[in-house]
Image (cartoon, helix red, strand yellow):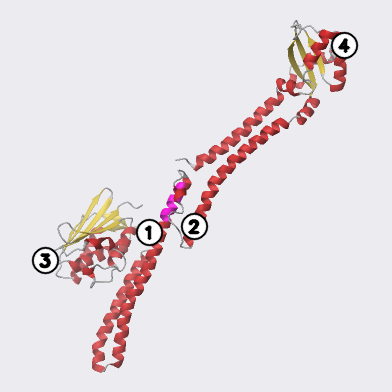
Amino acid sequence: MRSLFWRILGTLWLALILVAGLSILLGRALNQDAWILSHHPSLEGLAERLVHSYEENGPHKTQHYLEKFRHRERIDVQMLNDTGQPVIDGTFPPRAAAFEARQDNPRRLPWRRLTQEFTSPTSGDSYLLIYRIPYPELDAWHRGSLLQPISALGIALVVLTLFSLALALSITRPLDRLRRAVHDLGQTSYQQDSLSRLARRRDELGVLASDFNRMGQRLQGLIGSQRQLLRDVSHELRSPLARLRIALALAERAGPEQREALWPRLGQECDRLEALISEILALARLDAEPGARHPIALRPMLDKLREDARLLAPEQDVRIHCNGETQLNGWPDMLERALDNLLRNALRFNPPGQPVEVEVKERDGSLRIQVRDHGPGVAPEHLSQLGEPFFRAPNQSAAGHGLGLAIARRAVERHGGTLKLDNHPESGFIATLELPLSPEA
C-alpha cells in the first residue's frame, strides 16, 4: 500500500533536504576561491593580461599597470615566478605583509587572500599570482552577483511548488469527492459507484473510500428497510383498525343481545392491536443504544423459557442440552426475547409427541445455540425472506405478525452474532444462533 502518510512525510523531507542542500552548496560556492576567481569581474582574465604584459613590456610597465589597477579596483596583487621570487614589486605594502605574517588565523585579516597559478602559453613559464581583496569590497560584489544563486533557488522553489501542488491535489480532490458523496448521502441520492474509482487507490484515502462505500450501502439499505417497515406497519395496523371499526359500527346498530356478543370480538381485536404495537416497539428498541453488557448465565435463562413454554403449550416437550457453566457477555433481556421468540415459533409448528430440542455448544471462541422443531418446515424459496419484518411464509400466514424472527435476528446481530434459519436435513425447522463469547464482540 502506498501510504499517504509516507508520501507527505517524504515530500516534506525532500523539500527540507533540497533547500538545506542548496543553501549549503550556494554558501560554499560563493566562498570558493575558484568561484571568486572565475566570476569576479576585476579578476576575470587578469592573470593572462599580467603575464602577457610582463613578458612583452617588462616589469616596469607591468608594475605601472598594477598600480593603476590597485587604485581603480582596490585589490592588491603580487606576482611570483616558479621559484617563489617576486618578478615585480606588486602593490601589497610591506607593512601589510608583515602584519599578515604575524596572524595565525587568516580569518582575522581584513582582506581575503586568493592564489592563482598561470602558465604562459608563449614561454611555458609558470607564475603564481596572489590577490588580496578587502572583505567590504568582496561582500559588495557578493550582493551584486546573486542572480545565478537566486535563479537556482527560484528553480528549487518552482520544483517544490509543483511537488506541493501535486501532493495537495492528491489529497484535496479525493476529499472533495468524499464531501460530495456525503452530501449525496444526506440527500438520499447516493450512488454506490460514485467512489469506485477513488476506492481503487492503494493508500489511506482509498481505504476510506472503500469504507465509506460500504457505509453508504449499509445506510441506503437501512433507509430502504425503514421505509419498507413503515409501509408494512401501516398495512398491518390498517387491518385490525378496520375490523375494530366494523365491529363498532355493528355494535351501534345491534340490539342488546347482539351487542353483548360483539364485545368479545372487540376485546380480541384490541388485544391483537396491542400485541402488534408491542412487537413493533420491541423491534424499534433494538436499534437504540442498549447500554453496557452484562454476564449472562445461559442455562438458567433456558430453564426459565422452558417453564414459560409449559404454560403456553403443556403438551409440548422442550429438551435442553446445555452446560450449566456456559456464559457470555451481552444484554440479558434482548437475548431472552430472541430465544423466547424462536422457542415460541418452534412450539407453534412442532407436532405433539415430538420434542423441541435446544442445544448449546462452545467452539472456536463462539457459542452456538440451535432450536429445532419437527414441524413441516418452510419452502426453500421462502427461506431467504425469513427474518424480514412482517414476512410470513404461506404455511405460517395464520400465525403471528411476522415480527418474531425479525426481532430475534436483530437481537443476535446487536450481540455481534448471526442467525441462520433453515430446514433440518432430517425433518422440521432449525434456527442456529452464532454468538461471540468475547466481550469486545
Residue range (magenta)? 206-215
Q: Mark 3 and mark 4: span between their CA atoms?
A: 137 Å
> Which numbered disc, 1 or 3, marks the residue closer to the eye?
3
Q: Which residue is mark 2?
A: 182
Residue 288 visible, this orientation: no
> Which numbered disc, 3 or 2, marks the residue closer to the eye?
2
Which amino acid is tagged 3? Gly
Q: Earlier in the sequence, mark 4 or mark 2?
A: 4
> Which numbered disc, 4 or 2, marks the residue closer to the eye?
4
**Residue 213 magenta-highlighted:** yes
Q: Quadrant of residue 391?
A: bottom left
Q: Earlier in the sequence, mark 2 or mark 1?
A: 2
At label 2, counting other C-alpha atoms closer than 10 Å, the crowd grade (few under 14, some 14-19, many 20 or more) is some
**Residue 145 magenta-highlighted:** no
Q: Which residue is mark 3?
A: 353
Image position, residue 395 (x, y; %): 21, 69
Residue at 33% in and 76% down: 237
Image position, residue 191 (x, y; %): 44, 57
At label 4, counting other C-alpha atoms closer than 10 Å, the crowd grade (few under 14, some 14-19, many 20 or more) is some
Q: Which residue is mark 1?
A: 292
Q: Earlier in the sequence, mark 4 or mark 1?
A: 4
The quarter of the picture where the N terminus appears is top left
Q: Is residue 132 above or below residue 316?
A: above
